[in-house]
Image (tube, rainbow, N blue to C red):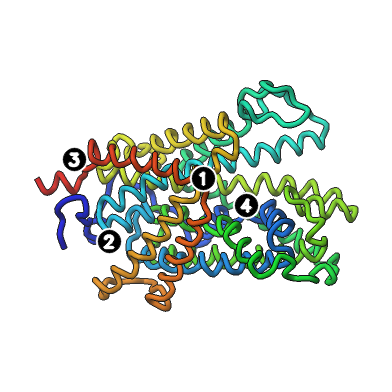
């Protein structure tokens, strides 16, 4: 195995010995699973399902989620194998570095820093909208200057009234603060919110099932089978989150056994809830009448359950907040791992002396997400997401095949089934979804790629721990 040049690979046994400043192993199986569910279930149920049902798939939104779930599972199995084999922080970055080389790992890590941070900002903007709407239902009016990013004023609002999306800024900083309380306390906060979110979803399903009219399922494919598959491309971004959770491997009590299970459990539980919620929604309301923005709250309000609509709005705010937690956690652990390897300044890898968390990189990324959330429109912020995560899926699926055939005797606590067919499905589906991305997304990605290329050759390659060890 060559260790020269930009494609030098970090031996897996060396990765296992990495100590850095040290993270505390406090997370059990169900805490990890809760973090995964926290990252997966969010806008997918509370808004995206309704939008896809109304405009793209009709009742076949159920099929959209199933197709997306199967495709996501193909990548999830690959992540699970690596998580059991390499129980260290960094997820796709670490796996790419170990199998495909330093520069591949660098670019995946560099992309994920942007993607995860942007997701935090986008979700914070979305929650801000829910929060503002909830306050208006309670007849509470906030000053207009704090309600949105400049230039995002809607109808009836004087242009120039908005200065900053203050609630989104505060929320990003609050999540950074929670993550810096120490992983044990932070995980307790996340787990509590996840339990509340799942309880709200179960309440929605439990009440809604008694108001299903099966005539609403006919026609089941009003936009044809192609509409269901187009919907799958849209909702795919609601069925990942385990990838960010896997960055916490170094904080798991028994990562090699628990992390693969947590990845599979979190996706399986989320998919069951997604499917049941879609059945209830499209059974209660004809797809043509589904509210694309607040589907469940509107559906229950229409049948006289206004109190449940308020509960759903509160549940959406609490539930989607868990997505912030999972992805800011993921961004901070990727940055921490890259810094420990010398690809970013090792100052970022310094952990808090008492809390044992990478507080510096967490605050840097928290502030970055707050700036994006406060001053960019949600559409522009959203365009920063997606492509890096899909590329990470491609890299992980390819890497698991390469490593299985190059080093088949490594001690794997979980093996991807159907090798190599299942990972190849993950690669094909991810590449297919990339083709749906806009030219603007590709342009932003190209700019970020070039910036990363400059930083890698100007700083990272020369300061890499691997580079220094070879001198």
- Between marks 2 and 4 in the image, the one whose residue lies nearer the viewer: 2
Query: What is the spatial separation of the Cα atoms under label 2 and label 1, in whole angstroms?
Result: 32 Å
The number of callouts visible is 4
Q: Which numbered tag is attached to residue 186?
A: 1
Task: Point out residue 245 in the picture as x, y percentages from the top left corner.
Answer: 47, 54
Q: Are marks 3 and 1 in contact (CB under 8 Å)?
A: no
Query: What is the spatial separation of the Cα atoms under label 2 and label 4, in whole angstroms?
Result: 33 Å
Using a 10 Å C-alpha cutoff, classify the residue at mark 3 as few (fewer than 14 neighbours), some (14 to 19) or many (20 or more).
Answer: some
Query: What is the spatial separation of the Cα atoms under label 2 and label 3, in whole angstroms?
Result: 20 Å
Q: Which numbered tag is attached to residue 462?
A: 3
Left or right: 312 with respect to 32? right
Which element carries disc 1, helix, strand or loop?
helix
Which element carries disc 4, helix, strand or loop?
loop
Q: Earlier in the sequence, mark 2 or mark 3?
A: 2
Q: Earlier in the sequence, mark 2 or mark 4?
A: 4
Query: What is the spatial separation of the Cα atoms under label 3 and label 4, in whole angstroms?
Result: 41 Å
In the image, residue 336 sits, relative to residue 247, either above or below, namely above
């Amino acid at each position: 195995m060559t260790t020269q040049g930009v494609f030098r690979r970090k031996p897996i046994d060396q990765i296992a010995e990495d100590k850095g400043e040290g993270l505390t192993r406090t997370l059990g199986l169900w805490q990890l699973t809760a973090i995964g569910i926290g990252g997966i279930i969010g806008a997918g149920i509370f808004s995206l399902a309704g939008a896809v049902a109304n405009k793209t798939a009709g009742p076949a939104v159920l099929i959209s989620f199933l197709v997306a779930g199967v495709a996501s599972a193909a990548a999830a199995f690959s992540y699970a194998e690596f998580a059991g084999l390499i129980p260290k922080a960094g997820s796709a970055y670490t796996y790419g570095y170990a199998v495909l080389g330093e520069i591949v790992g660098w670019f995946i890590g560099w992309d994920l820093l942007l993607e995860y941070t942007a997701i935090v900002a986008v979700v914070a903007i979305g929650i801000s909208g829910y929060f503002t709407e909830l306050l208006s239902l309670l007849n509470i009016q906030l000053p207009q200057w704090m309600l949105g990013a400049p230039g995002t004023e809607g109808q009836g609002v004087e242009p120039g009234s908005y200065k900053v999306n203050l609630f989104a800024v505060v929320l990003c900083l609050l999540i950074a603060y929670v993550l810096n309380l120490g992983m044990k306390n932070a995980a307790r906060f996340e787990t509590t919110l996840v339990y509340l979110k799942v309880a709200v979803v179960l309440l929605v399903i439990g009440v809604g099932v008694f108001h299903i009219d099966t005539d609403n399922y006919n026609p089941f494919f009003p936009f044809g089978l192609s509409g269901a598959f187009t919907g799958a491309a849209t909702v795919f971004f609601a069925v990942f989150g385990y990838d960010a959770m896997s960055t916490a491997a170094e904080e798991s009590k028994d990562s090699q056994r628990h992390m693969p299970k947590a990845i599979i459990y979190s996706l399986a539980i989320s998919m069951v809830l997604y499917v049941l919620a879609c059945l209830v929604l499209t059974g209660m309301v004809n797809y043509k009448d589904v509210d694309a923005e607040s589907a469940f709250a509107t559906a229950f309000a229409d049948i006289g359950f206004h109190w449940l609509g308020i509960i759903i709005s509160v549940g959406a705010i609490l539930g989607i907040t868990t997505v912030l937690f999972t992805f800011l956690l993921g961004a901070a652990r990727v940055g921490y791992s890259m810094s420990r390897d010398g690809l970013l300044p090792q100052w970022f890898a310094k952990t808090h002396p008492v809390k044992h968390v990478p507080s510096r990189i967490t605050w840097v990324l928290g502030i970055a997400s707050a700036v994006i959330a406060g001053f960019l429109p949600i559409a522009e912020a959203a365009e920063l997401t997606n492509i890096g995560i899909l590329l990470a899926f491609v890299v992980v699926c390819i890497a698991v095949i390469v490593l299985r055939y190059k080093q088949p005797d490594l001690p794997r606590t979980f093996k991807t089934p159907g090798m190599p067919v299942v990972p190849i499905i993950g690669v094909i589906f991810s590449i297919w979804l990339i083709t749906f991305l806009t030219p603007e997304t590709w342009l932003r990605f190209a700019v970020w790629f070039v910036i990363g290329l400059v930083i890698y050759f100007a700083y990272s390659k020369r300061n890499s721990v691997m580079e220094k060890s070879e001198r």
